[in-house]
Amino acid sequence: MSLAALFAGTKSAMAAYTPFAGPQAAFDHATEYEVLYGGAKGPGKTHALLFKGFSELTNPNAHFLFLRVDYPSLAEAMDRAQEHFPRSGAVWNEQKKRWTFPSGALYEFGYAETMKDVRRYQGREPSRIKYDEIGQLANERVWTTLLAELRSTDPTLIRQAEASANPGGPGEPWLMQRFVKKCGEDGSRIYVDPQEPTMTRRFIPATVQDNPIYANDAQYMATLNTLPLRQRQQLRDGKWGLGAGRALDELNERMHIVPVFNVPNHWKVWGAYDWGFGHPFSFGWFAKDEDGNVTLVDSCSGHHMLPWEQAQRIQAKAPERARLVVVAGHDAFAKRQAMGVDTPSIADTFREFSIFLTHASIDRIQGLNNFREYLKWQGPDGKTWTPRFRIMDTPHNRDVVFPVLESMMTDPDNPEDALKRDADSDTGAGGDDPYDMVRYGLAFQPAKPHVPIPDHVNPHDPDILKHMQNQTLAQAKAAQKKRQQRLLRMAGGL
């Protein structure tokens, strides 16, 4: 095929896609390294993703990789490609699930939900990665590992990772941290990595109102308008962070992060520690006031650090009284044999640095329920109160601990537990270690269920005071009776 015919074919295929003015056009022209498009149903995300950068397929070095979370969900995008790509002279290979364009450029379809899936694409060197409905991807590490495959030997090609998403899926927490919070809910900021200026991110929000076809479809709009409230806010309005699927759905930055303050000397203080080397260790120190309210005062972490290095970091972070009782996971007490000699446990090493570890309660389900009780700040009747667990606004608490807590999801195989997330062993990113640390810390002082006093109850009512007095007298009599019985038993034994 001649070059002129090739360009004519590509132009013919592109005629099938003219972006709508507004967010869709902004997405089509975006050149940032990572771009997330969407926020609701209906703005034409899949079509925009399919055709973004299409004119580059006249370059023989172009290689596009279009992904979804599983193979069956690719059907819609593959059908659209089947309708439009042959106009450019592209030929489909069913076995390899890819189109080859006359220039030699490739457009491949696949799926990636697990790290095992990602290995299928190692060495492919796509110049563009397109992940449709990435909100269904629970594991951020799959995305970041795919980014390592994004490359080309041709400097004229734009290397870009593009994705679309709706709020409410299992990937919502990490997408919020990676895109929405970094770029603003309105997409007004371009995020630039402070260490690597070329690593830029952009979030382009859009709703069904940005697609004139669906916006004028009364039946489609009626379908969205009659969804349950939370789904309506997510899928029609593009609202993020409404809690569907989150393990700690009452966690709220406005309610749970407080300014730094000095901890009074009479408050109960302790620490919590989650061991890690291949994944980061996490340490935090807590303070409890007279009313049973607990504050995470500060925290620290580290990756690929030896036990003594971790102990030194903790010493520098926490005062002495926060190191006298430190609850820790059971792996911190394990001893291992080397050449027939017991090697010291983490607890043994820490003791040399005046950090005294004790066994934490490690029951995951009970620990999650206790965590939720501490976070609770609203009742089913809409009434609110001050939560009994809050987090001081220190750099490490805000930038490391809070984002992890906010991103924890329920385990789809065990909805009573939080989904376990392992960190990247190379970078230390993406793990749930701060969650385990806070869970240990709160389990050390279990929360009592919050029982608000109804408005119609007057605590100074004479009948209520009389009842409370009778209860106190009854408890005192019972205690006196027990003392007398104990004295009689002692006398009988003489």
Image (cartoon, rainbow, N blue to C red):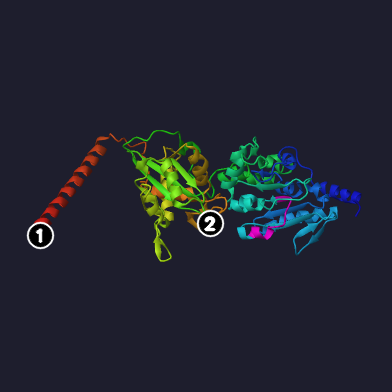
In the image: residue 297, left or right of residue 163 = left
The residue carrying pointer 2 sits among few (fewer than 14), some (14 to 19) or many (20 or more) residues within 10 Å by Cα, namely few
Among the two numbered marks 1 and 2 on one chain, the one whose residue lies closer to the N terminus: 2
What element does badge 2 sit on? Answer: loop
* Circle 2 residue: 412
* Circle 1 residue: 493
Q: Position of residue 212 (x, y in %)?
A: 73, 40
Q: Using the image, tell me which numbered label, if any, was put on residue 166.
A: none
Highlighted range, magenta: 117-129
Disc nearest the viewer among 1 and 2: 1
- The residue positioned 22% from the left and 39% from the top of the image is 466
Is residue 121 shown in magenta? yes
208, above or below 138, in the image: above
The quadrant of the picture occupied by the C terminus is bottom left
- In depth, the one of 395 and 404 nearer the eye is 395
What element does badge 1 sit on? Answer: loop
The quadrant of the picture occupied by the N terminus is bottom right
Mark 1 vs mark 2, CA separation in Å: 59 Å
Identify which amino acid the numbered label 2 is placed on. Answer: Pro
